[in-house]
Structures are given as structure tokens and as C-alpha cells.
Image: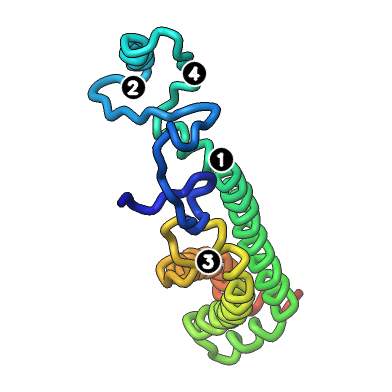
């Protein structure tokens, strides 16, 4: 009795297998697995000599390390997630730029209103909190919609994950924190600009 094995992809479910003697069901090739100490790259010649000491007519080909086999089996998945990481980074930059643009445009359009409020006695801190709060409100709405959308594609991603649950809370929590911090920074600059307005100059303009 042996443990479950995955023959093709790491994410595949193990299938029922029966191991038999080679003389009963001879295949076109056999596989020898060797646990070695030291440098794996220089062990190939020693394995070949060990096999040929038993049967000099046996061809030995495709001597590979376990790490290379695992890397080959997960190559497509690695490429897919690398592409997703690039798109995700681009999306974060677009979120920050877009949020900054929206808040900045809103501050520009409300310049007269903000200047009038400050001329009537509104505190700089209150103006800063109001503008920053408007941007963070948009951020929370976007995070809620994004979370709902991600829950809808969990089943599609589940088959590409190995020893990782798509329902792990940590990635969602970390993503929300990162996007929240970026959005707060994108909102802070326009909010700071609004709070630093000179009421007299705004009203005069």
C-alpha cells in the first residue's frame, strides 16, 4: 500500500491505482526513483553506472530531479498566475489613478462651495475629513462589489490551486487593506489641496 499520487498535474484529484509486477504487465519503460545526497546535477552518471552494472543493455534516459518534474507540471499554472499578477498590478495603478482623478475633479468643481464654507468659518480639519470621507466611501463600495465578483469566480480558480483553498480569508483581507491604503493616499492629496484653499482667492476667482 502506498500514498496517493498525482501523475499529471498537482491540482488533479488522485485516481485509484493498482501496482503490479513488471513481468505481469511489462511497459515500454520503467522508472527508477533515487534519493541522493549532494548535488543532484552530478548524480546522473552515477545512476547510469548503477543501472548498467545490473544490465548493460538497458538504456537510461530522461534523468530529472523531482523539483524539475514539479516545475514542469505546474508551468502552465505558474504562467497563468504570473499574468494575473501583472494584470492585478495594472488594475491597482488604474484604481489609484482613477480614484485620484475622480476626487480631484470633485474638489475642483466644488472649489467655490469649499471656499465659501471656509470663509464662513468652516475648519480646515472638517473640510479635509469631508473630502477624504467621500473618497473612502467610493472605495468601500468598490471593495464590496469586487468581493462579490470574486466570490462568483471561486469555482473557476479552485481547479488551478494546489493545497490552497479559494475560501482562505487572508488574501481577501490583505487585498482589501492594500487597496484601502492606496485609495486613502489617492484621496488624501485632493483633500489636502481643498483644505489648503485660500477662501479669499477662491471667492475672487
The disc at residue 179 is 3
Residue located at (59% from left, 91% from top) = 120
Between label 2 and label 1, give the one nearer the viewer. 2
Helix, strand, or loop for circle 3? helix
Task: Determine whether label 2 and label 4 are within 8 Å by CB.
Answer: no
The numbered dot on residue 75 is 1
**Mark 3 or mark 4, which has the lower sequence index?**
4
**Which label is found at residue 61?**
4
Q: Nearer the viewer, mark 2 or mark 4?
A: 4
- Mark 2 = which residue? 40
Q: Is residue 170 above or below residue 68?
A: below
From the viewer's perspective, tell me whether residue 141 is left or right of residue 111: left
Q: Nearer the viewer, mark 2 or mark 3?
A: 2
Which mark's residue is nearer the viewer, 3 or 1? Answer: 1
Q: Considering depth in this image, is 35 or 132 the residue closer to the camera?
A: 35
Query: For the view shown, which residue lies furthest in the bottom direction?
Result: 120
Residue ranking furthest to the front: 24
Report which quarter residue 115 is drawn in: bottom right
Comparing 152 with 43, the one in front is 43
Q: Is residue 80 above or below residue 103?
A: above
Considering only order in the chain, which callout, 4 or 2, is on the residue closer to the N terminus? 2
Amino acid at each position: 500500500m502506498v500514498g496517493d499520487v498525482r501523475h499529471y498535474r498537482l491540482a488533479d484529484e488522485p485516481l485509484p491505482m493498482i501496482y503490479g509486477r513488471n513481468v505481469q504487465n511489462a511497459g515500454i519503460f520503467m522508472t527508477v526513483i533515487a534519493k541522493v545526497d549532494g548535488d543532484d546535477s552530478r548524480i546522473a552518471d552515477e545512476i547510469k553506472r548503477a543501472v548498467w552494472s545490473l544490465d548493460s543493455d538497458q538504456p537510461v534516459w530522461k534523468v530529472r530531479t523531482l523539483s524539475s518534474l514539479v516545475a514542469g507540471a505546474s508551468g502552465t499554472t505558474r504562467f497563468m498566475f504570473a499574468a494575473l499578477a501583472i494584470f492585478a498590478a495594472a488594475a491597482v495603478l488604474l484604481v489609484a489613478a482613477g480614484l485620484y482623478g475622480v476626487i480631484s475633479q470633485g474638489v475642483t468643481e466644488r472649489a467655490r462651495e469649499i471656499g465659501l464654507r471656509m470663509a464662513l468659518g468652516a475648519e480646515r480639519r472638517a473640510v479635509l475629513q469631508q473630502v477624504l470621507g467621500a473618497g473612502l466611501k467610493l472605495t468601500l463600495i468598490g471593495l464590496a462589489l469586487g468581493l462579490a465578483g470574486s466570490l462568483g469566480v471561486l469555482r473557476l480558480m479552485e481547479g488551478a490551486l494546489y493545497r490552497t483553498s479559494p475560501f482562505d480569508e487572508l488574501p481577501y483581507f490583505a487585498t482589501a487593506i492594500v487597496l484601502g491604503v492606496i485609495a486613502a493616499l489617492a484621496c488624501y492629496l485632493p483633500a489636502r489641496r481643498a483644505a489648503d484653499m485660500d477662501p479669499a482667492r477662491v471667492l475672487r476667482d
